[in-house]
Amino acid sequence: MKNRVQKIRKAVIPAAGFGTRFLPQTKAMPKEMLPIVDKPVIQYVVEELVDSGITDIVIVTGWHKRAIEDHFDYPNELLATLKEQGKDKLI
């Protein structure tokens, strides 16, 4: 019997919790949305997953994490970034 290596295509990002270790910064926004240079942390995570071939991404959030939903709900920034990087096939 041959061993088949299957590609991983799905990823789950746990993004729930209050981020109390990052207080007082997390009073205004979720820890996943804290910026590093010019993008939120979670954007870097998603971009790395896409770069590694992941096609299905699930972000598990709490009820109070509307900023994450809003960030990914309108993909204009992501679409522009993907186009700039020549990754039109991912759109």
Image (tube, grey):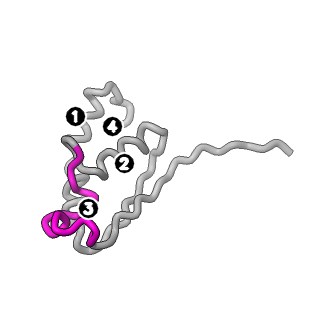
Asked if residue 32 can be seen in this view, the reply is: yes
What distance separates the C-alpha of mark 3 from that of mark 4?
27 Å
Residue 80: numbered disc: 1
Relative depth, front residue between 21 and 1: 21
Question: Which residue carries the number 4 mark?
Answer: 91
Residue 81 image point, x, y percent: 25, 34
Residue 40 image point, x, y percent: 24, 50
What distance separates the C-alpha of mark 1 from that of mark 3?
24 Å
Residue range in magenta is: 19-36
Closer to the N terminus: mark 2 or mark 1? 2
Query: Does the magenta run of residues contain 78?
Result: no
Q: Residue furthest left?
A: 28
Mark 2 residue crowding within 10 angstroms, few (<14) / some (14–19) / many (20+): few
Residue 45 image point, x, y percent: 37, 48
Please state which amino acid type lies under the numbered disc 3.
Lys
- Residue at screen point 69% across, 43% down: 5
26 relative position to 58: left or right:
left
- Residue at screen point 22% across, 34% down: 80
Closer to the N terminus: mark 1 or mark 3? 3
* Image vertical order of residue 38 relative to residue 28, above or below: above
